[in-house]
Amino acid sequence: MQRFFLFIADGFEEVEAVTPLDYLRRCGTDLTLVGVDADVIRSSRGLTVTCDIALSELIGRGVEAKENAERLAASTALAILPGGLPNSRTLSENTELRSFITETVKHGGLVAAICAAPALALGGWGLLEGKRFTCYPGMGADLPTQPVKGARVIRDGQFITACGAGAAEEFAFTLVDALYGEKRLAELKSSIVAR
């Protein structure tokens, strides 16, 4: 069974998390919302969200987490990291999440990040070296591979990245297309009266 995850922590950017969550669930994706520090998370603008599960419940902690992350990553089709600066910092500093995302990449799963998350998390973990990616303008200057300036959404192999909240819908559409193809994307766009 393929697994799909969206990871958030306090200070996440609402539209960058909720748009892909909504659109993927409309397509029938069993997307699990994971709280990195807890199962109740507060967004950057004060929205309180109850997650499906906390990361510690999903994979555990310490040595146990590394082993569980390896097993779970083998069945992960997609892992999403939304932005928001406090959220992106928390994601990037979490060793259990880093292990899980690294294992997901090794097992061929898609990894998607938007806003500050591509630079702080994926870039900080060394996963974007030699890849084309985008992130929030002005971020990523310290990375070995520089982000593509002015790009809204980029897919490079297993990685899908986007620049920020204003590109959240394009980001979500790219995720739907990557998982289900153009026909299902067209059906989704029609059902939500997209431009």
Image: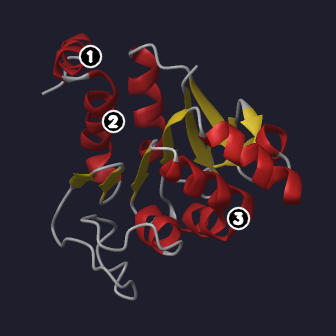
Q: Which mark is residue 92?
A: none
Coordinates of residue 145 in the picture (x, y in percent): 31, 79
Name the quadrant of the C terminus: top left
Coordinates of residue 23 in the picture (x, y in percent): 38, 25
User: What residue is pinned by disc 1?
Assistant: 188
Question: What is the distance, in whole Å, between disc 3 and disc 1 at their CAs?
Answer: 34 Å
Left/right placement of residue 45 relative to residue 131 reads: right
The correct choice, above or below, for 149 with respect to 165 in the image is below
User: What residue is pinned by disc 3?
Assistant: 94
Q: Residue at x 87, y 51 (%)?
A: 64
Q: Residue furthest left?
A: 195
Query: Quick one: SS at disc 2?
Result: helix
Residue flagged by tag 2: what amino acid is it? Leu
The correct choice, above or below, for 123 with respect to 80 in the image is below
Disc 3 vs disc 1: which is toward the camera? Answer: 3
User: What residue is pinned by disc 2?
Assistant: 175
Q: Residue at x 48, y 36 (%)?
A: 18
Q: Which residue is more in the foreground, 63 or 95?
A: 63
Q: Which residue is more in the foreground, 167 or 108?
A: 108
Density class for disc 3 (Cα within 10 Å; few <14, some 14-19, many ≥20) is few
Query: Quick one: SS at disc 3?
Result: loop
The correct choice, above or below, for 143 with respect to 16 in the image is below
Question: What is the distance, in whole Å, between disc 1 and disc 2 at their CAs?
Answer: 12 Å
Left/right placement of residue 69 relative to residue 25 reads: right
Q: Residue at x 54, y 24 (%)?
A: 2
On the image, which quarter does residue 171 sit in? top left
> Which one is earlier in the sequence, the residue at label 3 or at label 1?
3
Q: Residue furthest bottom?
A: 142
On the image, which quarter does residue 175 sit in? top left
Question: Could you tell me if residue 123 is visible in this image?
Answer: yes
> Which one is earlier in the sequence, the residue at label 1 or at label 2?
2
> Which one is earlier in the sequence, the residue at label 3 or at label 2?
3
